[in-house]
Amino acid sequence: MISKKHKKISLLLAMLLVANWAYTADTHTINHLFELNKHASLYTPRTVTELQQIVKQAAQEQKKISLVGADKSQGGQTISSDKQAVRISLKNLNRLLMLDLAHKEVTVEAGMTWAELQKHIVHHGMAIKAMQSYDDFAIGGSLSVNVHGQDILYAPLITTVKEIKIMLANGNIVTASRTENSDLFSAAIGGYGLIGIIIEATLSLTDDVLLERHATLIDAHELSNYFLTHVKNNPKTCFYSARFSMGSNDLLKKALVITYEYSNQHNQSLFALASPTKDLWKKPLIELTSRVEIIKNWRMCLESLYNNMPQTISRNNFLNYSIETLPQERADSYNILQEYFIPYNQINAFLDYLKIVVQTYHVNLINITARHVPQNDESMLSYSKQDVCAFVLFINVDKNRHAYQRVASWTNKLIDKAIACQGVYYLPYHLLGTQEQLEKTYPRFQEFVQLKRSYDPQGLFSNALYEKYT
Ligand SMILES: Cc1cc2nc3c(=O)[nH]c(=O)nc-3n(C[C@H](O)[C@H](O)[C@H](O)COP(=O)(O)OP(=O)(O)OC[C@H]3O[C@@H](n4cnc5c(N)ncnc54)[C@H](O)[C@@H]3O)c2cc1C
């Protein structure tokens, strides 16, 4: 006779086995995808006609196409698991097509990076409105993720887009804007390369200006009030971020609010573009944070001292940082990003839960920062249906299956908490959310898939995100 206790234990073991199998499968899929990434044929067309030929040939041969920008997404968003799939990078389609200084607009080919765009516009006193914190990314890749940065007004990226040109699965090129093919506009921007190939974009620009840094150390639980009272309502604020304490003594207790305010200075020499690796000296310190616990305790003190030093910087130079200034993958570990968008009235609940997760799972934090993303739901896969505080986690993970399974385990819990807080998690990183979590946070996902199928019935454009969730 099997006792009730034994039955319970067997059931529990069976559940654990299933859970373990699910995570193992996930880990396997990701490793498998990265292997494929190395072997898939990569095309780098130099003209739109060449691109069109590649698309037509792949369609005829019933192959899948995955699109590649700067290839910095972390979860296979630029890779298909289909062994025959081709990858197309637009890095050679990176020309400046039009710069209209009177209307502060620029039209570029989508393979151009933000760094390349800055070089074209800086001499005209123009600057980019919305982009990531680093400028190595391709504009096509950034549009397909609908990225955001630290500017408190200009975000997400779609808000700065006038129109795009897209090559569809049948090879036809169409213009999409808020008034023309608006369904394609809202599906392709933030559509992870699944609707078609964005070949051109017209973006609005702003003036290059000088900015002055300010830093204030506050109690982390005061962040919401502080941001809404002193940052968002301050007409001088341009860029905003907050960095959280990460030491074992003060984990997530303090927040260093860093703002860049419009300056009255007129020092012309500050407008010249500096090197994108100008702050490379910070790299070893950031690197050490993931290796030496005591540095975590000292980081807030050092950051506070450093950021309180006066700094005047041009908008272009603030946006001109390379990801080379960040710690890179090591032999035994790698660094991953995650991001959660939480409404302001819920950020303390989320922070409290995050603290428990970090402590329980010994998450090796390199950075936790916050930004602001204003409400915008123009993209079908919008992550900011209301004003949100974006929590960015930069984490070091050991290169072994057990460590990855732990990340998967706590990530699912954190996504559930984000959902309970009416928040959203971000999709350009490891695809650890479940189908249910994805559809709860991106309620138009099925509508998006239907639209994709209507423009791409053969399923030509594909990647790990599409393959996992459809
Ligand atoms: C270190 C680091 C810092 C980051 N900081 C930020 C940040 O500050 N803010 C933020 O919002 N995000 C940030 N991210 C996330 C980043 O914005 C995304 O990973 C983004 O996709 C990277 O751009 P990419 O050019 O590398 O795109 P890729 O990774 O190459 O591609 C992204 C997606 O776009 C598709 N795609 C690429 N080109 C095209 C095209 N021409 N037409 C259609 N689809 C296309 C791809 O198929 C893929 O699905 C960061 C990521 C890293 C690694």
Image (spheres, rainbow, N blue to C red):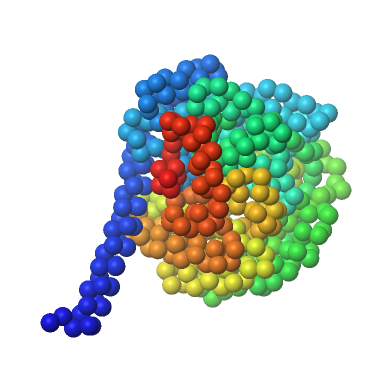
Q: What is the x, y in percent for residue 286? A: 53, 56
Q: Could you say which is closer to the camera, residue 435 or residue 307?
A: 435
Q: Residue furthest left?
A: 1
Residue 54 lies, with reference to residue 339, above or below; the image says above
Q: Name the residue located 65 percent from the left edge and 27 percent from the top edge.
A: 175
The quadrant where residue 305 appears: bottom right
Q: Could you say which is closer to the camera, residue 372 or residue 167?
A: 167
Residue 392 left/right relative to 176: left
Residue 272 left/right relative to 84: right
Residue 111 lies, with reference to residue 212, above or below; the image says above
Q: Is residue 37 visible?
A: yes
Residue 5 left/right relative to 307: left
Q: Name the residue located 75 percent from the left edge and 43 percent from the top edge.
A: 314
Q: Name the residue located 39 percent from the left edge and 54 percent from the top edge.
A: 333
Q: Is residue 200 visible?
A: no
Q: Could you say which is closer to the camera, residue 245 or residue 54?
A: 54
Please tell me in which quarter of the rendered image ligand 1 is found.
top right
Q: What is the x, y in percent for residue 216? A: 72, 65
Q: Quadrant of the C terminus?
A: top left
The quadrant where residue 112 appears: top right
Q: What is the x, y in percent for residue 138? A: 57, 35
Total marks shown come to: 0
Q: Quadrant of the N terminus?
A: bottom left
Q: Name the residue located 69 percent from the left edge and 62 percent from the top edge.
A: 257
Residue 49 lies, with reference to residue 174, above or below; the image says above
Residue 152 lies, with reference to residue 276, above or below; the image says below
